[in-house]
Image (cartoon, rainbow, N blue to C red):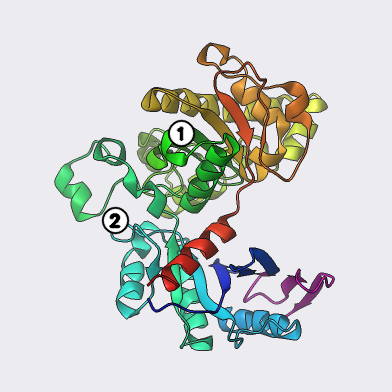
Amino acid sequence: MTATTASRVLVLNSGSSSVKYQLLDMATGTRLAVGLVERIGEETSALSHHPLVTGGAKREWEGEIADHDAALKAVAEELDSDGLGLDSPELAAIGHRVVHGGLRFTEPTLIDDAVLKEIERLVPVAPLHNPANITGIRTAQRLRPDLPQVAVFDTAFHSSMPEHAARYAIDVRTADEHRIRRYGFHGTSHAYVSRKTAELLGRDPSEVNVIVLHLGNGASASAVAGGRCVDTSMGLTPLEGLVMGTRSGDIDPAVVFHLGRVAGMDMQEVDELLNKRSGLVGLCGDNDMREIRRRIDEGDETARLAFEIYIHRLKKYIGGYYAVLGRVDAVVFTAGVGENAAPVREAAIAGLEEFGLAVDKDLNAVRGDGARLISPEYARVKVAVVPTDEELEIAEQTYALVTAD
């Protein structure tokens, strides 16, 4: 790419009915504006916009936003009213979160027609995510056809997994023909958090082995050796792995056949069950960890069992990734639950003292916005809380690509 003096990057995360966005100045490391458009295409849509650089108050409004074109135009108008418009010569690029990049896209990639066509080809392995990402890209291209558009892929960080970790034990020809393998997701978060954990420890990422636990409504774990992912819990889709808010995580695949035979459920119904009516919400009716903990404190045994199942699965992955890595320097919690739910962190590490792991109750109880250690000084393996920043990671990767000589 030709070097540019422009330093702003707009990051877009387009969902099926939403657009999250952030505008960042990479020269100063300043977040200029953040916002969210929700319920696109519904009778009443909502936009929340917060101009940070001007010190202005958050603005919120509701109205009809018919499609992503209208959503991004509304975003552009909000930015323009703060002097941060998309027509600014300061805008260097637009960075897009794209969930699935398959085997082809292992780095941030400048989007052209061929790249967009390949992202479309991957829709069958990411039917809930890639179509929305594509819509956001096409809309942004129409608004600024002259501007570099960069795709940053959730799967990219995990592309370093060795074949013995990425392959499923099924017929090789069938797997290759249909691109069936473990890809992993939340890659921008795992990349950012593993690097920031090394900084917290005062060491180079190449020297550090880390187990990253990204715990939100969607949840995933990764084993990172020397800055490279060697295993991760999500697979062909984001359904595999940990117990999540509404997703089952690991399950015997024969459950699908069993439900077809004994319950008469078709594939769509099973898909709905495992992705939207399982996990914590399936176990106890709530996917908000705060509500689950409140119910436990009131003696709700259904909520308690759901929490115990969640923690049991988490412990299995911590232990498994400890074995995969051989040596672990830190276990780190991130994302909404990981950063804010002290009982989850305490329970996940409890009983792992023989592995050199421990949590200091006082440190664990402290709430904070920054990266911090919550293990006692004597612990051989550090336990940390590191807030994730996927938007910053996308912006940094986007800016590095468009300013490279």
Looking at the rendered image, the quarter that the C terminus falls into is bottom left
In the structure shown, which secondary structural element does the residue marked by tag 1 occupy? loop
Tell whether position 32 is magenta: no
Task: Tell me where residue 216 sits by quadrant.
Answer: top right
Q: What residue type is labelled 1?
A: Val
Is residue 58 depicted above or below 373 in this figure?
below
Which residues lie in the magenta part? 35-64
Could you tell whether 176 is left or right of 147 in the image?
left
Q: Residue at x 56, y 41 (%)?
A: 199
Q: What residue type is labelled 2?
A: Leu
Is residue 119 depicted above or below 114 in this figure?
above
Residue beneath label 2, please? 103
Is residue 363 depicted above or below 161 in this figure?
above
Q: Is residue 357 visible?
A: yes
Label annotation for residue 106: none
Give the alpha-carbon distance from disc 2 to disc 1, as whole Å: 26 Å
